[in-house]
Image: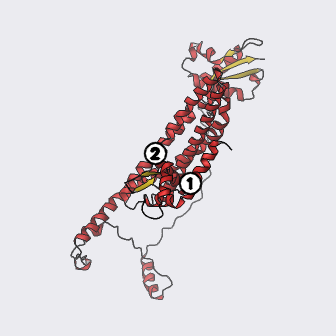
């Protein structure tokens, strides 16, 4: 076992030996040197290993790094936690480590290259862990709707804070996806050792993280909108509560004693009551008979059978012939196919159209679309004509769009 492993085990044994003191300092926020479970030897050991730091002359608290680790393990909710605060800084380290690894490879510094590869892998694992923890924490806050705070104003302020933190994490994920790190690692043979960790820990999980972040942001923004809608009603309730505290003898007046209802009584819309007669009640049968007798009779509609007519064609009318004129792109397509010679170089459909002024009003995108559509049809005139599509390279690896630059037409 190496000396480094011995130091780790020794530190863990010290934490285990003084675990009661560490737990008291974490739960209480501090530990008194003269009270249980603190001991002079324990205070000395923990201070020597920078586990406890002085709070006052006789009180100590846990180091911030250890307290933060325990908060993450126990999932302790904090007010205005800096969720994802160092994700952007961790992501900014990756291009620098890639550059240093490439330089070490080109200069033949093998030991330095191994060190940069280990540092890059650790940075990737650390970044993935921070992103995962930040998303879990934001999801917990979104699902519980900030259960740790009580007032509406506190919920509103915390909601706005975490919406901003979620947007910062989104920007960091966007920079990882569109920053060209994957292309840089693939293009540099010296960075091949960095690919497994980057692809497995970050690249393949970016889509899932961004979708989860979009869901969380949508929940937070929807909840913030509802809080803003509830705020006016909550303000009136707080004002009424303050009025009752200042006037404990206040009694609501009886509405029946008022000549007119108060203004606040008109805030709620009255119930719409609709009466329905009970046809099975014998007491209402006579009233229903009187009502039915007063109803006017329904008008009688006489339906006459339709007469069969005859169609008479006028003597002076001649049948008209409708001539369908071909559209410009149809004439251009036929002319292009007729002009393509066999056993010759392919003809650019875009250059051919631009060289003829009579088709200047025909837009280039519409013309290419018509040529591509003609290529999909099985017609006799295009049996010996081949259409070759010329595409532009995609803007990035995840793009699913096909951008057509031109179509080459040849006769075989």
Which residue occupies 52% across, 34% down? 92
Residue 247, position as x, y percentages in the image = 22, 72
Report the residue at 57% width, 57% height from top.
16
- Indicate whether 70 appears above or below 376: below
Under tag 2, what secondary structure? helix
The residue at which mark 1 appears reads as: 14
Between discs 1 and 2, the one toward the N terminus: 1
229 or 7: which is nearer to us? 7
Q: Indicate the position of residue 100 as horizontal and vertical percent values.
A: 58, 26
Q: Nearer the viewer, residue 309 or 336?
A: 336
Residue 321 visible: no
Query: Disc 1 or disc 2, which is closer to the eye?
Result: 1
Q: Is residue 82 above or below residue 367?
A: below
Classify mark 2: residues with Cα within 10 Å, few (<14), some (14-19) or many (20+).
many
Most extreme residue toward the left, as rendered?
259
Q: Quadrant of the C terminus?
A: top right
Which of the pair 102/28 is nearer the observer? 28
The picture places residue 235, in percent across and down from the top left corner, at 31, 60
- Residue 377 can be seen, yes or no: yes
**What secondary structure is marked by label 1?**
helix
Neighbor class of circle 1 (other Cα within 10 Å; few <14, some 14-19, many 20+) is some
Colouring: secondary structure
In the picture of the structure, the residue carrying the numbered disc 2 is 165
**Looking at the image, do the residues carrying marks 1 and 2 touch, with CB atoms under 8 Å apart?**
no
Q: Is residue 267 above or below residue 314?
A: below
- The residue at 46%/65% (across/down) is 36
């Amino acid at each position: 076992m190496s000396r480094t492993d011995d130091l780790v085990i020794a530190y863990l044994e010290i934490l285990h030996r003084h675990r009661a003191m560490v737990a008291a300092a974490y739960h209480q926020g501090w530990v008194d040197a003269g009270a249980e479970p603190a001991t002079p030897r324990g205070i000395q050991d923990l201070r020597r290993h920078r586990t406890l730091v002085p709070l006052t002359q006789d009180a100590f608290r846990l180091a911030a790094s250890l307290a933060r680790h325990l908060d993450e393990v126990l999932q302790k909710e904090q007010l205005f936690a800096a969720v994802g605060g160092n994700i952007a800084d961790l992501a900014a380290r990756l291009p620098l480590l890639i550059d240093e690894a490439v330089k070490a490879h080109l200069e033949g510094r093998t030991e330095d290259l191994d060190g940069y590869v280990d540092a890059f892998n650790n940075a990737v694992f650390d970044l993935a862990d921070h992103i995962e923890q930040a998303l879990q924490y934001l999801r917990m806050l979104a699902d519980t709707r900030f259960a740790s705070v009580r007032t509406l104003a506190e919920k509103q302020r915390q909601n706005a804070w975490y919406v901003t933190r979620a947007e910062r994490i989104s920007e960091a994920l966007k920079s990882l996806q569109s920053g060209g790190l994957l292309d840089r690692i693939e293009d540099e043979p010296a960075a091949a050792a960095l690919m497994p960790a980057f692809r497995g820990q970050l690249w393949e999980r970016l889509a899932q993280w961004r979708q989860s972040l979009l869901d969380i942001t949508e929940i937070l923004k929807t909840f913030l909108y509802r809080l803003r809608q509830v705020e006016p009603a909550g303000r009136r309730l707080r004002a009424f509560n303050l009025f009752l505290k200042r006037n404990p003898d206040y009694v609501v007046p009886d509405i029946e004693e008022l000549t007119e209802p108060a203004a606040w009584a008109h805030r709620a819309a009255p119930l719409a009551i609709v009466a329905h007669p009970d046809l099975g009640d014998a007491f209402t049968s006579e009233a229903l008979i009187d009502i039915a007798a007063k109803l006017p009779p329904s008008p009688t509609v006489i339906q006459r059978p339709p007469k069969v007519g005859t169609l008479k064609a006028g003597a002076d009318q001649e049948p008209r012939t409708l001539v369908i004129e071909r559209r410009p792109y149809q004439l251009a397509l036929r002319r292009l196919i007729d002009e393509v010679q066999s056993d010759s170089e392919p003809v650019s459909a875009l250059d051919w159209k631009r060289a003829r002024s009579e088709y200047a009003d025909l837009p280039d995108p519409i013309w290419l679309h018509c040529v591509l559509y003609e290529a999909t049809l099985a017609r006799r005139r295009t049996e010996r004509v081949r259409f070759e599509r010329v595409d532009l390279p995609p803007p990035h690896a995840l793009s699913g769009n096909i951008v057509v630059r031109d179509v080459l037409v040849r006769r075989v």
